C-alpha cells in the first residue's frame, strides 16, 4: 500500500514534467514553423506563459505532496503533535504556491496585481487580528514541539495570571495542554499561556530522598503517635516548608516503625545531622532512630499539587 501510493506520487511528478516538456516543444514549433500574424502570435505567447506557470506550479505542488507523504510515513516521526502539525504546514506551503502561480498567471495576462496584493495584505492582517488567539496557541504548540520542554506523562508546574497549576500532562493538542492534578481534576491550559509564562518540569528535577526511621512500641496509643509525628513534621518544616510521606511497617512483635520520607532538591548534610540529633533526643528511650538518604530518579517523586479549578485560569 505504501509503495503503491509512493509510486503514484512519482508518476504524478513525471506527468507534470512531461506535460511541461510537451508544451515547450509545441510552442517553439508553432513559433518557428507556423506563420502567424503578430496579434495571434501575441495571444499564443500569452497562453504559453499562462500554461507554463500552471504546469510549474503543479510540478512544485506534487513535489511538496511527495515530501510530506514521506515525512508522515517516516518511522522517525513518533510524536502525535508533529503529525498534527504536518497538514497545517503542507496547507500553508500549498496556499503560497497557489497564490504565487495565480499572481504570475495574472501578470502574464496583463492584469495589474498591485491592487490585488494590497487588498490581500489588508485582508490577511484583518484575518490574523481576528484569530489572534488561535495563531498564538499554534505558536505555543510549535514552541512545545521544538523546545521539548515537557512530554506526555511528565509532571509540570505552569504559572498562570493568578496561581500555579501543577499536575501530569495527559495530552498536548494544537490548542491546549491537558493537565490532571493530584485530586483528579482536569485543567485545560491554553498553549499561549505555556508559551508566554514560565513552566517547571518537575519530572526532570533531581531530588534527594531522606528517610527518617522512627520506632514506636505497639503499646503506644494512636494519639501519642500522631502527636509525635506532628512534632517531627514541625521540626522538618522549621528548615523549609515541604510535604512529607509516612509509611508504617512491623519490624518485630513489639514495635512499629514509621518511615518519614522527605524530598529535598539537593543534598543537605546539615539537615541530616540536625534531624538525627533531634530524633535521638525526642524519641529517647524508644531506640535510636536511623536516617538514610538516597538519590531518587524523577519518576519516584510524588507530585505536590494544589487544588485548582478551571475558573482560576
Image: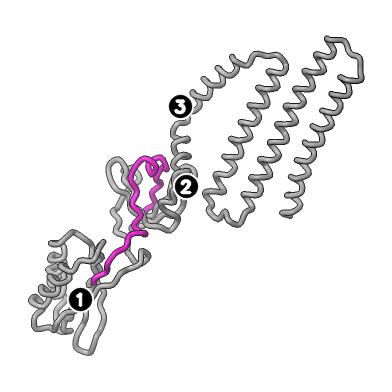
Give residue 309's position: percent from left, percent from top: 33, 47
Residue ranking furthest to the bottom: 253
Residue 253, numbered circle: none
Residue shown at the point (72%, 18%) measured from the top left: 108
Above or below, comparing residue 172 to residue 183 in the picture: above
Per the image, the residue denoted by label 3 is 129
> Dividing the picture into quarters, in which one does residue 239 lie?
bottom left
Residue 293 vs residue 228, the one in the foreground:
293
Q: Local crowd at mark 1 within 10 Å, few (<14), some, or many (≥20)?
A: some
- Taking the image as shown, residue 195 lies to the left or right of residue 108, namely left
Q: Local crowd at mark 2 within 10 Å, few (<14), some, or many (≥20)?
A: few
SS at badge 1 = strand
Q: Local crowd at mark 3 within 10 Å, few (<14), some, or many (≥20)?
A: few
Q: How is the image coloured?
A: one colour
Task: Magenta stretch: give its range.
Answer: 185-210
Residue shown at the point (34%, 57%) measured from the top left: 202
Residue shown at the point (51%, 26%) measured from the top left: 127
Residue shown at the point (57%, 48%) measured from the top left: 83
Give residue 89's position: percent from left, percent from top: 57, 40
Per the image, the residue denoted by label 2 is 146
Per the image, the residue denoted by label 1 is 291
Q: Quadrant of the C terminus?
A: top left
Give residue 248's position: percent from left, percent from top: 25, 77
Of callouts 1 and 2, which one flags the residue occurring earlier in the amino acid sequence? 2
Of callouts 3 and 1, which one flags the residue occurring earlier in the amino acid sequence? 3
Q: Is residue 192 magenta?
A: yes
SS at badge 2 = helix
Q: Quadrant of the N terminus?
A: bottom right
Amino acid at each position: 500500500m505504501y509503495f503503491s501510493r509512493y509510486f503514484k506520487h512519482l508518476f504524478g511528478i513525471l506527468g507534470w514534467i512531461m506535460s511541461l516538456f510537451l508544451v515547450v516543444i509545441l510552442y517553439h514549433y508553432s513559433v518557428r514553423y507556423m506563420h502567424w500574424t503578430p496579434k495571434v502570435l501575441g495571444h499564443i505567447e500569452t497562453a504559453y506563459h499562462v500554461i507554463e506557470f500552471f504546469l510549474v506550479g503543479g510540478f512544485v505542488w506534487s513535489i511538496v505532496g511527495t515530501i510530506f507523504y514521506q515525512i508522515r510515513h517516516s518511522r522517525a516521526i513518533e510524536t502525535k503533535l508533529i503529525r498534527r502539525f504536518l497538514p497545517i504546514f503542507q496547507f500553508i506551503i500549498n496556499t503560497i504556491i497557489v497564490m504565487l502561480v495565480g499572481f504570475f498567471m495574472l501578470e502574464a495576462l496583463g492584469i495589474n496585481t498591485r491592487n490585488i496584493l494590497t487588498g490581500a495584505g489588508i485582508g490577511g492582517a484583518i484575518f490574523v487580528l481576528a484569530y489572534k488567539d488561535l495563531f498564538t496557541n499554534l505558536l505555543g504548540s510549535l514552541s512545545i514541539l521544538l523546545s521539548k520542554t515537557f512530554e506526555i506523562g511528565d509532571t509540570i508546574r505552569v504559572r498562570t495570571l493568578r496561581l500555579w497549576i501543577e499536575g501530569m500532562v495527559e495530552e498536548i493538542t494544537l490548542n491546549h495542554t491537558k493537565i490532571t492534578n493530584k485530586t483528579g481534576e482536569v485543567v485545560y491550559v491554553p498553549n499561549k499561556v505555556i508559551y508566554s509564562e514560565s513552566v517547571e518540569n518537575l519530572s526532570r528535577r533531581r531530588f534527594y530522598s531522606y528517610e527518617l526511621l522512627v520506632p514506636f512500641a505497639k503499646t503506644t496509643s494512636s494519639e501519642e503517635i500522631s502527636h509525635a509525628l506532628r512534632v517531627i513534621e514541625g521540626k522538618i518544616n522549621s528548615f523549609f516548608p515541604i510535604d512529607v510521606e509516612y509509611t508504617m511497617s512491623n519490624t518485630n512483635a513489639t514495635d512499629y516503625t514509621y518511615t518519614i520520607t522527605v524530598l529535598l532538591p539537593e543534598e543537605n548534610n546539615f539537615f541530616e545531622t540536625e534531624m538525627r540529633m533531634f530524633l535521638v533526643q525526642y524519641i529517647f528511650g524508644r531506640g535510636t532512630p536511623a536516617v538514610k538518604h538516597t538519590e531518587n530518579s524523577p519518576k519516584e517523586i510524588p507530585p505536590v499539587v494544589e487544588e485548582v479549578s478551571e475558573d482560576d485560569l
